[in-house]
Structures are given as C-alpha cells and as structure tokens.
Image (cartoon, coloured by chain):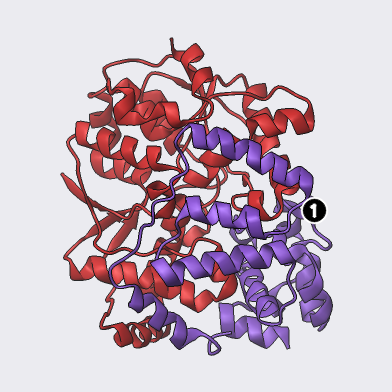
Amino acid sequence: MLVEEIKKIADENPLACFQCGNCTGSCPLEFAMDYGPRKIIHMIQIGLDEEVLKSNTIWLCSSCYTCTYRCPRKVSFTRIAYALKNIALKKNIVPRNVKVFYETFLRHVLEYGRLNEGIFVNELVLKAGKSFREVIRDVNLGIRLWRKGKISMKISKIKRVEDIKKLYELVEGKEV
Amino acid sequence: MKVAIYPGCSLEGMENSYLVSLINTFKTLGIDIEEIEDWNCCGATAIPSINLMFSYLLSARVLSIAEESGINTIIAPCSECYNRLAYVNYKIRNDIKFKEKINDYLKNIGLKYDGSVSVKHPLEFLIKDYGIEKLKGKIKKKIDRKIAGYYGCLFVRPREIAIESAENPKTLDEIIKAVGGTPVEYDYKTKCCGASLIITKSDAALKLIRDILKSCIDASAEMIITACPLCHSNLDMQQETISITYREDLRIPVLYFTQLLGISLGLNDEELLLSKNLTYELLEEVIK
C-alpha cells in the first residue's frame, strides 16, 4: 500500500489530508498535470496506487513547497511526491528522459561526489531521446553558453568519494 | 569577520559568476570566506527523487565535516543547497530518532553529527549578521533603477527553514534599497521558475519562466536580481527561447544580488563576472 510506503520513506501521512485543495490551488505546475496534488492524495487515500504511480503528476512536482507551506493539515505533498518518485523509479514506471536525468545525476554523485554540470548537460542532450525541435533548441543555447565560457569540461572530484559509495550501498534497497 | 562556505556544484560549474561575485563582494565588506573541506553534492532535487534517505545522508556528511572542522556557521548561496542542508539540520536538531538513524549510517564512514552547525543563506547572513545599516555605509555608487527582486522557492519554503515570509519576502528588496534602487512590487516574487524541469519538462518550465519575466516587466522593472543559480540560469538563459516560443519580447537584464551589490561597491567585471550573464548587453544599456 502506498500509504505505508510513503510513511516509511518520507514520514508523511496522506490520511491526515481533509481535501481542502489549498495545495492544488497553490501548485504552479497544476496546469500540466494529469491530476492535481489534492486528487493524487485522494487517490492514495482510496488505494488507487497504480493510477497514482502512472500519472505524470509526480514528475511535474518541481519541489517548490508552496503546497507544503499552505497546508492546514501539515501534510507535505512535496515530500509525498519525493516518496512516489522513489517508488516509481524502483518499479521502473518512469518516462525515459526523466530516468536518464536521474540516473546520470546519480552516476556523477557516486563517481565524483559532485555534479559536473558541463559534462552532465552534454550527456543528457545525447542520451535523453529528445525531439528534433528540443535538440535544436539545446544546441542553439549550448553554443551561446560555450561562447560565454560557461560550459566547462573540467572534472571536480572529492577526495573521499568512497564515503559516498558506501552510504549509497547501505541505503540502496533498504530505505525504499 | 569570517565564515565558511558550501559552494555547491552549480557555483563550481556554470554559475561560477555567483561564487566569484559573492567572494569578492564579501571580501570588500571585510568578510573572509573559507571553503568547507571535501564537500560533496547536496543531491539537489534529483537524489531525493531516487532515494530520500540517501539525500539526507549527503547533507549530513557535509554538516558532519563542518562540525569536525570547528565551523559554527556555513553559508550556502545556492537556494537548493541551502534548502537541503538546512532541512536536514533542522530534522537532526528536532527529531531524535532521525538523528540516531543518520548517525548510525554516518558511523560507517567514520563520521558523526551532533547538530552544532548553523546553515545560512548569504542574504540572511548579510542582513542579520553583518547588518544592513553597516552595508549601506559601504555603498560607493548609487544604482537608481527600478529593480525586481526574484526570490524563488527554496529559502522561503518550507516553513522550518524559511529565512523570511514566503508570502511577502523583503530581503532582496532591502538589498535593492541599500544600493539606492527602487524595489518593484509584482505578483511572481516567490512563484517557482521550474528549476530542473527546464531539462525534463521544458515546455512547462518555459511557461513559468515566461510568466515571471512578464510580471516583472509589466511592473516596469528595469532589471531582475536573483539569489539562486537555478532561478538565475532559467531567467537569464531562456529569454531568447521564450521570445521565439511566445512571440513576445520579454528581454530584461538578470543578475545576482551579489553582482548588483558588487557594482555599487565599485568592483570591476573581473571581480563580478557580469559579462558571463547572457543578458549582459541589456544590463550595459540600463546602467550606463
């Protein structure tokens, strides 16, 4: 059940929500979502787990915390969305470009302990399966950034990167 | 005065101008900055999406290293880093079970964290710790322009870590007034810019950025100042794409609050890297 998993991962209780809709009214990305935050929480409450995990809502939450700030029941949809992302990624219910984004980010953190933005952005453009229009848009912007000297291919790596790998090994498969 | 800094990946990467302008501005104000040793990525929004506990541990490792080095206060200029570090710090200080769990994990890499470090956004540090009146006394050049302070999300929300009200924030406006400018009132001060959705859901993010730019311009702002590398890159870099997509001219100079402050302190481009902003040419027209 999602309710229990959310409690375990994010220490949030969707059952505390009384459906006032402050979250949906405040959400800047609601216009692009299948279901707004209030509906998603309701769907979790009545056990529509599969529909929740398949909705585009969880990938559209930008983590702005406006819903969290205004919730009268102290429920954080932002943190619920994080838990849902954890679960959906584990079950591999995720759009390809989003998956590539997270996997590439994780690889940087595990390999260097940091995100090397120049290399990261290049990898994404190549691997994310973007549309022709998007690639043209990215390349156009990329050229302008390159001219400004904003894109560096220099690698920054921490000394004790084994710390990071160790922590990930310990939580992987246990906390989600 | 001395303070430790957690620069974060973005300030080491594409948004290096924020770091350079911050260090030089602070130095001019008499604040020395030292970097935390062997700091790692905070995880931003990506790592908590993969494994929430792993993201908490990334922040906890940084806090632990800081505590071990005897550091009292860390400034985190990136709002995302500030948000992650400050929230984990808050949880550790207020939830004993959480603290125990974090320390159980940290033990495996020879670290522990007791909760003694405070995490601050540089805006809070400048206004409260350094003092806005003292800051005003250092201003050499008045910038008498209408300026929009764009706050974004992550140092005003959630409540546990907010440096001020998310519904009516004032810190950037204080900075604008300090340099002799007029802060403009507009509706989108703390509306989200979409952050990394510009990569994964670009059409949705472009709409958010477009609305913010339009709101600032409609309120007759002549420039926008930011305090976060994600906000900054979205507002600064996407103006051309937005002009093409929405067929409207929404060009306006965007700069970091540290760059604005630096100009008024008499610093040069080498010290502020203003020319790295994609909207730099527009700024030249406004401040000449």
Name the residue carrying label 1.
A32
Q: Position of residue B263 (x, y in %)?
A: 34, 22
Q: Position of residue B84 (x, y in %)?
A: 45, 62
Q: Which amino acid does label 1 sit on?
A: Ala
Quarter of the view holding residue B140? top left
Task: Judge from the rendering whether residue A51 lies leftward or rightward of residue B134; answer left or right.
Answer: right
Compared with A174, A157 (above or below) is above
Q: Residue at x 33, y 82 (%)?
A: B106
Quarter of the view holding residue A41? bottom right
Task: Judge from the rendering whether residue B20 lies leftward or rightward of residue A63; answer left or right.
Answer: left
Out of B46 and B164, give the one closest to the viewer.
Answer: B46
Task: Judge from the rendering whether residue B120 lies leftward or rightward of residue B159; answer left or right.
Answer: left
Name the quarter where the N terminus of chain B is drawn: top left
- Which colour denotes chain A? purple
| Label 1 CA crowd tier, 10 Å (few <14, some 14–19, many 20+) | some
Q: Position of residue B101 (x, y in %)?
A: 40, 86
**Letter of the chain that mark 1 sits on in the rendering:** A
Q: Where is residue A148 in the image (x, y as percent from the top left)?
A: 47, 32
Q: Is mark 1 on a helix, strand or loop?
A: helix
Quarter of the view holding residue B70? bottom left
**In the image, which lettered chain appears red?**
B
Q: Residue at x 77, y 78 (%)?
A: A44
Residue B5 in view (yes/no) = yes
Name the quarter where the C terminus of chain B is drawn: top left
Q: Which residue is drawn at 45% across and 56% down?
A: A116
Task: Judge from the rendering whether residue B26 lies leftward or rightward of residue A165; answer left or right.
Answer: left
Out of A137 and A47, give the one closest to the viewer.
Answer: A137
Residue A77 in view (yes/no) = no
